[in-house]
Image: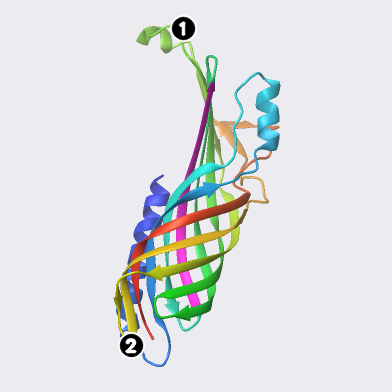
Amino acid sequence: MKNLSRTLVSLIVIIVASLSFSQGFSGGEFGGLGGGDFGAKWMDLGELNKTLNDNNLPTFSNPAFYTGGGGYALIGKTLYGGEGYGITLSEKADDYTVELDVGYGLFDIGYLIYAKQSLRVYGMGGVGFGGMTFKVSEFPDSKKFEDLLTDYHENLFISGPIPIFKIGFGADYILTFKASSSTGGFAIGISAGYVFAPFDPIGGWKLSDTSVSNVPKFGPTGPYITIKIGGGGFAF
């Protein structure tokens, strides 16, 4: 998740810069807001679950717990921002465990639909890249180190980069400081929308350095809903 960490650091820089930048303007709305997000994410798992079931392996269920963060700078009625998210699904049955990890980052651009003092409602679209890993493991028969060197019980499949698109709506409310021409402080928000991953991973899937064929199509395509906890400020 190193790329996700870099994305979040970049978002903090964007927010801080936008807050400073906004103080030099009048006659419009300027500022920024950001924070951490958590919520639910539904994913496209039908083909993968069928393959797992056909091979007597545990299957995944929706929705998944969804965590990450994001932020935006507001200039006039246009929002510019970014976000990064991670999703982990894990299921165990009998002696087998399957685990799916998904992570992605997006550049966002949006439009302010409604604003009044501390409340902002907006539409947002995003484009970026992500990646996935899929792991299937079996509880080993032995716990001795030398036995485990030659008796493998785990396969880790790694995808190439995946183009990601999203469209959604959000609403943020600042709870603290208010003035006639500005507002700022602690904020909460809610967002909902749909993520699209319509293309196969670039470069396909690999197990170690070996390319893997006939991988079922699955990924983060599907709806989401998140709650944001963070902060920001706006001048208007």
Residue depicted at x 61% and y 28%: 59
Which labelled disc corresponds to residue 141?
Answer: 1
- The local secondary structure at tag 1 comes to loop
Q: Secondary structure at mark 2?
A: loop
Q: Residues within 10 Å of mark 2 (few under 14, many from 20)?
A: few
**Majority secondary structure of magenta residues:** strand
x, y percent for residue 44: 65, 43
Magenta region: which residues? 78-92
**Lower position in the chain sequence, tag 2 or tag 1:** 1
Q: Residue 216: in sight, yes or no? A: no
Which residue is most to the bottom? 27
The quarter of the rendered structure image containing the N terminus is: top left
The answer for how far apart the CA atoms under marks 2 and 1 are is 69 Å
Q: Is residue 195 visible?
A: yes
What's the amino acid at mark 2?
Ser
Which residue sits at x=66%, y=33%?
A: 48
Checking the image for residue 113, the label placed there is none
Nearer to me, 93 or 196: 93
Asked if residue 97 lies left or right of residue 178, the reply is right
Residue at 47 percent of width and 72 percent of height: 80
Residue 10: name its quadrant: bottom left
In x, y percent, where is residue 186?
31, 66
Residue 230, placed above or below residue 79? above
| 150 in the magenta segment | no
With respect to residue 53, does 24 lie above or below?
Answer: below
Q: Which mark is residue 180?
A: 2
Choose mark 2 or mark 1, whichever is in front.
Answer: 2
Queried whether the magenta region covers residue 81, the answer comes back as yes
| Horizontal and vertical percent position of residue 96 | 54, 18
